[in-house]
Amino acid sequence: MSAQTQLRRKTVRDMAKAKGGQPLVCLTAYDAPRAALIDPHCDLILVGDSVGMVVHGLDSTVGVTMDMMIMHGQAVMRGSQSAFVVVDMPFGSYEASPQQAFENAARIMMETRCQAVKLESGVYAEETVRYLVDRSIPVLAHVGLRPQAINVDGGFKAKGRSDDERQRVIAEAKAAESAGAFGVVVEGVAEDLAAEITELLSIPTIGIGASASCDGQILVTEDMLGLFDWTPKFVRRYGNVKGEITAAVENYASDVRGRAFPGKAETYSLNSEKSLKIPRVDD
Ligand code: KIV
């Protein structure tokens, strides 16, 4: 990527400026063509570890690896031009120590050339976030419902129902801010808690299942495109990709079986203007 391309991208400063202003538009992407489609409309693209569930068929994000995140991060960077791209740190890649986090975050930044990393940050992670930011790695924190904690939580559970839990989520968000995170994803909390956190912090909050009171919104792209039968309550479907794919594949199968595809238009013939030569990349 040239320096010019790098300069066209939104920066961490654009993210910070969004505090209290026009909401940040954020979506996930895991591959180049989808990144290219959403890039002109998004402020921030997250290469989320949700890739494990959405693309790789895992039942949680716990099995996602560094190599998976790096491969998808590289694809999204190739496909996008202007959005600020953040790559998730997978489970097990940052919790052991700030040094472990730095080694893995630096690898993600160097091998993908993304602009920042995201990590699911309990209060314990304050030191880690500070360690990364002090060493030139911008961090987006993630508080509230933390999908990588599924095994201690016993499922994907909304957070902040009890007073204790509420105080814990607020403490997580404040710890991330004081450690230098440029923003915080707030997942799965009721509106009053999201509003309180957004009010308390001077950095932007990006909500997912956290009401319109946040400074931005993020969804898993495939959820909002309607690829799945089931989606969480907080998802609004803006498309019917599952229906479109199913209809197209049904039509294709029926055409192939009925010998309606390929037809004349899709067939080379000796008299046709179209060359019989198979095009090569370097032709
Ligand atoms: O992995 C992911 O896609 C995420 C978003 C849903 C916030 O963390």
Image (spheres, rainbow, N blue to C red):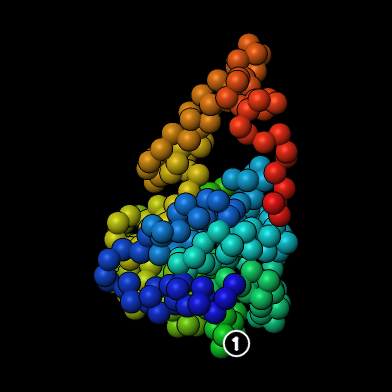
Measured as percent of width and height from the top left, residue 245 is found at 53, 31
Q: How many marks?
A: 1
Amino acid carrying mark 1 in the image: Arg
Give the vertical position of 240 relative to 76 (above or below).
above
- Residue in front for this viewpoint, 184 or 41: 41
Q: From where the camera sits, is residue 214 visible?
A: yes
Measured as percent of width and height from the top left, residue 27 is found at 45, 56
Give the vertical position of 138 relative to 237 (above or below).
below
- Residue in front for this viewpoint, 45 or 168: 45
Give the vertical position of 167 relative to 149 (above or below).
below
Check disc 1: other Cα within 10 Å, few if <14, some if 14-19, many if 20+: few
Name of the residue lying farthest toward the bottom: 134
In the image, 200: left or right of 154?
left
- Indicate the secondary structure of the residue bearing disc 1: loop
In the image, 169: left or right of 255?
left
- Residue 129 falls in which quadrant of the image? bottom right
Image quarter where the N terminus lies is bottom right
Q: Residue at x 59, y 62 (%)?
A: 78
Q: Residue at x 27, y 71 (%)?
A: 20
In the image, 187: left or right of 116?
left
In the image, 93: left or right of 135?
right
Name of the residue lying farthest toward the front: 271
- Residue 87 falls in which quadrant of the image? bottom right
Q: Residue at x 47, y 43 (%)?
A: 223
- Residue in front for this viewpoint, 139 or 267: 267
Measured as percent of width and height from the top left, residue 151 is found at 64, 53
Name of the residue lying farthest toward the left: 21
Residue bearing the label numbered 1 = 135
Q: From where the camera sits, is residue 123 visible?
A: no
Measured as percent of width and height from the top left, residue 49 is found at 60, 57
Q: Residue at x 69, y 74 (%)?
A: 107
Give the vertical position of 148 relative to 226 (above or below).
below
